[in-house]
Amino acid sequence: MPKGKVSFISKEQLFEMLENEEPLTLVEVLPEERYRSGHLPKAITIPLQELEARAAALLPDRAAPIVVYCSSFLCTASTGAARLLQSMGYIAVRDYKGGKEDWTKAGLPLVTE
């Protein structure tokens, strides 16, 4: 994958991966209070501002599949997170650009803490 090029994943592809229990780490990059108010199933929270400091501890395998997301197609946090992770040597990062808004508009549930 060329440096700086972000790969995107659709809601359908992500849903299929989750349903099939494929190995992936799903990361919400919004502030933690937004995560607690509702997040995609099986997601962890690493706010974008903390990503660089916390990635090595929470995402130790730089070859493992990672999907980042934020609030909607208009939110740029997930694309920024994908680029940051790529610059840190992560090689299987994808951006679910539609985020929570796209997920819930399709009638799919969010998980609350």
Image (cartoon, rainbow, N blue to C red):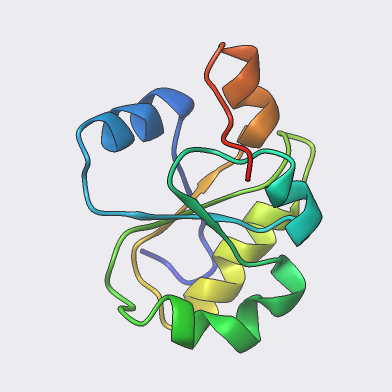
Give residue 86's position: percent from left, percent from top: 49, 73
* Vertical side of 45 occupied by 106: above or below: above
**At 67% from the left edge and 38% from the top edge, which residue is drawn?**
38
User: Does residue 22 appear left or right of residue 113 in this picture?
Assistant: left
* Vertical side of 18 occupied by 107: above or below: above
Residue nearer the viewer, 25 or 36: 36
**At 77% from the left edge and 48% from the top edge, which residue is drawn?**
34
User: Does residue 61 appear left or right of residue 12 in this picture?
Assistant: left
User: Does residue 38 appear left or right of residue 25 in this picture?
Assistant: right
Give residue 25's position: percent from left, percent from top: 39, 58
Residue nearer the viewer, 35 or 13: 35
The total of numbered circles placed on residues is 0
Residue 16: image quadrant is top left
In this view, the residue farthest toward the front is 113
Q: Quadrant of the N terminus?
A: bottom left
Residue 83: image quadrant is bottom right
**At 34% from the left edge and 63% from the top edge, which residue is drawn?**
92
User: Does residue 32 appear left or right of residue 21 in this picture?
Assistant: right
Give residue 95's position: percent from left, percent from top: 52, 49
Residue nearer the viewer, 21 or 62: 21
Give residue 112's position: percent from left, percent from top: 63, 38
* Vertical side of 45 occupied by 69: above or below: above
